[in-house]
Amino acid sequence: MRWLTVTLAMGFIVALLFGLMAVAYAVSAALGDLGWLSNLVILMVVFVMVIATLLTVAERKWSAMMQDRIGPNRARIALPGLKDRSLGGLPHVASDALKMLFKESFIPKSANRVLFNLGPVLAFAPVFALFAVVPAGPTVTVGGQPVPMVVSQPDFGLLYIFAIASLAVYGTSLAGWSSNNKLALLGGVRAASQMISYEVGLGLSLVGMMVAMSTVQLPAMVAGQERHLWEVTLSLGSWSLPLGIPAWGILLQPVGFVLFFAAAFAETKRAPFDVPEGESEIIGYFVEYSGMKFGMFMISEFVEIVILSAVTTSIFFGGHNLPFVGAALAKSDFFLSHPIVWGAFSGMVFWVKVLLLCWLQLVIRWTFPRFRYDQIQSLGWKMLLPAGLLNVFVAAALVLIDPELKLLAILGMVEIGAVIALTTTRRAGEEDHGHLDEHASGPSTTGTQDHGPPAVAASAAPPHQGLSGRAP
Amino acid sequence: MSYQASQNPRDDLRERLYIPELLKGLAITTRHFLRNLFRTRDTNTSVVDRKGPNLVTTVQYPEEKVQYPEGYRGLHRLVPREDGKPRCVACYMCATVCPAQCIYIEAGEYDPADGASESKVIEKYPTAFVIDELRCIVCGLCVDACPKDAIRMDTYLHTPSEYTREGFVYDIPKLLKGPAVSHKSDPWNKRPDSEEPDHQHLEPHVRIGAGLVAHKAPEHHAPKIIVSTDQPVPVVKFIK
């Protein structure tokens, strides 16, 4: 009855998220003006750090399941009831952390000691700070006082994320350079070039959402996605339930989502964009690091996963909004009279979405092979950048035509439908399709790509270009 | 639906768009993940190619063991007689044939005057029989060479680990284990006070292989009884 155990464990996790968010709201409300402090501690230290720590073992366990293995299950807790239980590999978190803490922290003789020690800090701190502007729950009113579930709400929300995210490159570059190791230097240079190239695509990919939501603040963006584009009211006698299609970013901006996810994935330096690390060719910018300094690089990678999931959730998946029925629930008597419960429920929805996106990132990491270096650069500059620019123009035009965003959503749904159709339908015989003129023939096919002319569509597959077009 | 790669990726719409192909890859990974996450793992170690709901093929070694094939040459054992003493008659044939020279035997002689019944029919016995398992190359020639079926490699064990090299030098108490074996033609069965009837002598060419008709191969995965030498040894009679 493994499925029962797994389902119960998932239910336990969801309940735990609910409880923790309830505690977060209660403490934040009790602290009053200092609520941001409790948000800082609970959201960033407890939620983000714990999820990132658990992801280290989740990555090993989940990748094992994807590859038909069992995964880590040998670490045990030497207590009477637990001695013979693997506990899903969870004790490995403790054993890994202890191992890294007690290992020798080696510094090469010829390394620049100051920068060598600064590297992990500079790689970790900016990543960690990113979460400060992500709302984990709605602002509820407790005792006439608003209780926001976000550390800080600066006016420049998303720009803060861009600014701080690009700071992380200093850590990796410095680590690569200060190690005085040619492989580490190579990794650092690769990381720097990759992250700088993808900054552009990253920024451009979100402009469409900024235009559609008319804000750069993440809480406002989440609030904007609460609105229903179309609404149907189911009525049964006196009882009626308004169901609606929410104005989620994924519906309005599917292209923006794909571009953002790809670019942000490249920023996290994980497979398939892991050339800076590239453990099979160069060990990467942290080749000289050992012990907890290496652990800082590793944990910052996992923190990046959580942050990226949280930001993606906030921008494209409605943040803490429950789709379809969320608006109806918010107006129900129970939730109106228990704002903390509503906040905790919304926060639970947010964290469940974050966990699902973390899982998606791990699936991507364990499915796709590493891009070659030139493929990464051509993907960034020749595909993401022009596609992002086109996306901005198309989104801006459609928002200008229809400020209700319905036109944008229709286009987005057509794009999503076309991708689903292309994915689920089988390839017909080789002679039936595949000619280049088909790119221009169907509006939906070009629409999925980048709303653009075939010239841009032709740059959609840089790996293949690289494979067949550049043979010496 | 098995995945089929396009022959010419440049001419394929899905491959050019790239995203549908990525999604297909993700679907395959996800299917494996969900099957292995939600379904119970099959612990049957004899099946390698899983067709069931859970696809995990891992064998958790110390708890689950893959069965060794029939005829697996495992750790040596000295085959005991019915009275628990080794069947070995110290003929040195195994020590001579051993290519790794890992067998060392010291022979002792039965004194016909001492009144022990086996001394009337058996001339020699090993006072020391030592196999260095670190030197052994597990070729099985000693088993073939033995004229008395006194050394076998049918334990289906491999040499357990030890902390010292000396531990791998197996002497008679460590080697003497497993079920006792008795053949009708054994001199042991012809001793004066044997309860067995005397062996009926057949022509050599008739005798060779005659017993094989009735010979039943031991159950492959029957529990391997490790018999300590100070206990009475259970007897397996192969030829009646």
Image (tube, coloured by chain):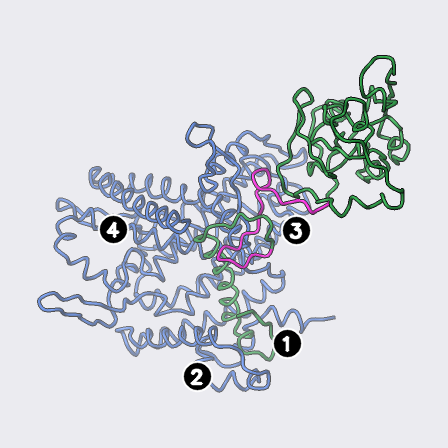
Amino acid type, callout 2: Pro
Query: Distance between the Cα atoms at labels 2 and 1?
Result: 26 Å
Chain under numbered label 1: B
Mark 3 or 1, which is nearer the eye?
1
* Residue at image mark 1: B7
Q: Are marks 2 and 1 on the same chain?
A: no
Helix, strand or loop for disc 4: helix
Helix, strand or loop for disc 3: loop
* Residue at image mark 4: A345
* Residue at image mark 3: A280
Write down the region rendered in magenta: B49-71
Q: Which mark is residue A443?
A: 2
Colour chain B is painted in: green
Q: Residue placed at 42% from the left, 72% from the top? A: A391
Amino acid type, callout 3: Ser
Asked where in the image residue A215 lies, by quadrant, the reply is bottom left
